[in-house]
Amino acid sequence: MKIIPIMSAKFILLVSSLMLMVYSTSNKEVDTVVEENIIVLVKYKAQPDKGITAISELTKLIEKVKQEPHFITVKLLVDPKDDTNILLHEEWNDASYYNGEHMNTSHLQEFISNSRDFLTGPPEISFWKIENEFKK
């Protein structure tokens, strides 16, 4: 059995430690680069007798939003008992984009300006993370 000199053992330990640090750091970097999708719930209230107009205008807006980067999906939901209650269920893969560039797009700014004619005020917006997803 050959005994490794103490200097060589320290060198091997140092190299092993560095390799372990590089491996764990590189895995952490991958984790921080990959962002989870966000769910955005946007709750609108249309003016009385303007529910159909609001739905139509939102549909036109969504057709433009679908072309944006980081967009995944949107569901336009309407209260079956009151068409002035409208909810968008949106999924995006970049919260920073949604809160920045998306909010400043010309089509969204135009919608906001025109919405005074059919909405009661600004929407209620909330952000959610997907904890778990259950499918059949």
Image (cartoon, rainbow, N blue to C red):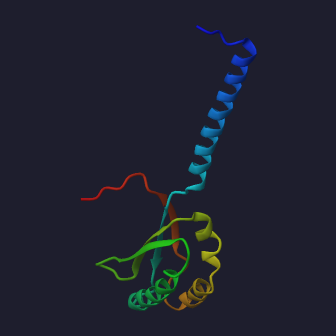
In the orientation shown, which residue stands out farthest toward the right? 7
**Residue furthest toward the front?**
1
Between 84 and 13, the one lying in front of the other is 13
Question: How many marks are shown on the rendered structure?
Answer: 0
Q: Residue drawn at (64%, 75%), measured in percent from left and top?
A: 101
Q: Determine whether 61 is above or below 26 in the image.
A: below
- The one of 83 and 31 positioned closer to us in this rendering: 31
Question: Could you say which is closer to the camera, residue 31 or residue 112?
Answer: 31
Give coordinates of residue 80: x percent, y percent: 29, 78
Residue 35 percent across, percent down from the top left: 55, 57
Outermost residue, left side:
136
Kindly indicate the quadrant of the structure image that contains residue 7.
top right
Quarter of the image where the C terminus is located: bottom left
Foreground of the two, 57 or 102: 102
- State the image coordinates of residue 121 (x, y, percent, origin top left): 54, 80
Q: Residue at x 35, y 83 (%)?
A: 83
Q: In which quarter of the image is residue 112?
A: bottom right
Q: Report the side of 69 relative to 51 (left or right).
A: right
Kindly identify the residue that appears in the image at 52 percent across and 81 percent down: 65
Quadrant location of the N terminus in the rendered image: top right
Residue 91: percent from left, percent from top: 46, 68
Q: In this view, does 55 lie above or below 91?
A: below
Q: Which residue is drawn at 49% across and 61% down?
A: 37
Judged left or right of residue 53, residue 27 is: right
When the figure is inspected, residue 73 is found, relative to residue 131, above or below; the finding is: below
